[in-house]
C-alpha cells in the first residue's frame, strides 16, 4: 500500500487494500488436460492449485455435477502483488473500465500463458488461458463474511468503482481506459 494513497484518508478503516487475487483456468474436463493446467498455474504463481468442481450437469458439454472441470489459486499479500505486476505487464498496464464492477472487484482474462515473461511454449502442455479476479476492499470487510456474529458493512465503508480504479492506478501504475 502506498503511503501517498493512505494520506488521502482521515479514517484508517477507509484506506483501500488488495484483499485477494484468484487465478482460474477452466478446462471443462478432468484427466491429462487438467493436470497440464495444474502445471501452468503452479509455474506462474508458485502455489499449488486446487480443483474446481462442476456444480451442475450440462449434457451439451459432457459435464456432470461433481466432476473436476478446472483449477484455481488464491493469492494474498505480497504474492498477489507480484503476480499482478506480471499479469498487468502482459496486458501492457492497461485495463478497460468494464473490468471493474460497482463493488470494487476487478476481472480480466489472459488468452495465453506464454505471454508471461518467464513462460515459454511447451508443446506437451499446449495453450491455456486464464481468468483473474481481484477483490479490493477495506480493513473491516471480514465482518460481512465471518461465520459468527455477521454484520453488514456500513455504506460509507463499501468500495465503489471509482475508488477501486484510483487504487489500481496508484498501486500498479495502471491505465484504465473507457471502451
Image (cartoon, rainbow, N blue to C red):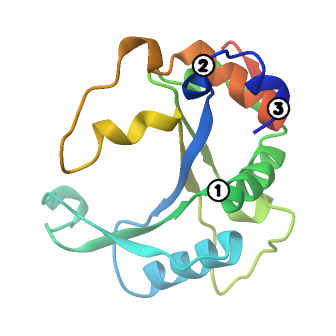
Q: Residues within 10 Å of mark 3 (few under 14, many from 20)?
A: few
Closer to the N terminus: mark 2 or mark 3?
Answer: 3
103 left or right of 120 in image = left
Of residues 50 and 68, the one nearer the viewer is 50
Q: Position of residue 17 (x, y in %)?
A: 62, 37
- Given residues 127 and 94, the one toward you in this image is 94
Q: Is residue 94 visible?
A: yes
* Marks 2/3: CA–CA distance: 14 Å
Can you tell which mark lies on residue 3? 3
Among numbered discs 1 and 2, the one appearing first in the sequence? 2
What residue did someone put label 1 on?
A: 77
- Hey, which quadrant is residue 64 in on the image? bottom left
Which mark is drawn over residue 11? 2
State the SS at label 3. Answer: helix
Q: Quadrant of the C terminus?
A: top right
**Rendering coords of residue 166 (x, y %):** 71, 20
The answer for how far apart the CA atoms under marks 3 and 1 are is: 16 Å
Q: Secondary structure at mark 2?
A: loop
Amino acid at each position: 500500500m502506498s503511503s501517498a494513497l493512505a494520506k488521502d484518508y482521515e479514517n484508517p478503516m477507509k484506506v483501500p487494500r488488495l484483499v485477494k487475487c484468484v487465478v482460474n483456468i477452466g478446462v471443462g474436463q478432468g484427466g491429462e488436460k487438467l493436470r497440464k493446467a495444474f502445471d501452468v498455474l503452479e509455474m506462474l504463481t508458485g502455489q499449488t492449485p486446487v480443483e474446481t468442481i462442476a456444480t451442475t450437469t450440462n449434457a451439451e458439454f459432457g459435464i456432470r455435477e461433481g466432476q473436476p472441470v478446472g483449477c484455481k489459486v488464491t493469492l494474498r499479500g505480497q504474492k498477489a502483488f507480484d503476480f499482478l505486476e506480471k499479469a498487468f505487464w502482459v496486458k501492457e498496464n492497461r485495463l478497460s473500465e468494464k473490468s471493474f464492477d460497482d463493488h470494487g472487484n476487478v476481472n480480466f482474462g489472459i488468452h495465453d500463458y506464454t505471454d508471461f515473461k518467464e513462460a515459454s511454449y511447451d508443446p506437451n502442455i499446449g495453450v491455456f488461458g486464464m481468468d483473474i479476479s481481484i477483490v479490493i476492499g477495506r480493513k473491516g470487510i471480514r465482518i460481512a463474511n465471518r461465520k459468527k456474529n455477521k454484520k453488514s458493512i456500513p455504506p460509507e465503508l463499501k468500495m465503489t468503482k471509482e475508488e477501486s480504479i484510483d487504487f489500481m492506478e496508484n498501486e500498479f501504475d495502471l491505465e484504465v481506459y473507457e471502451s
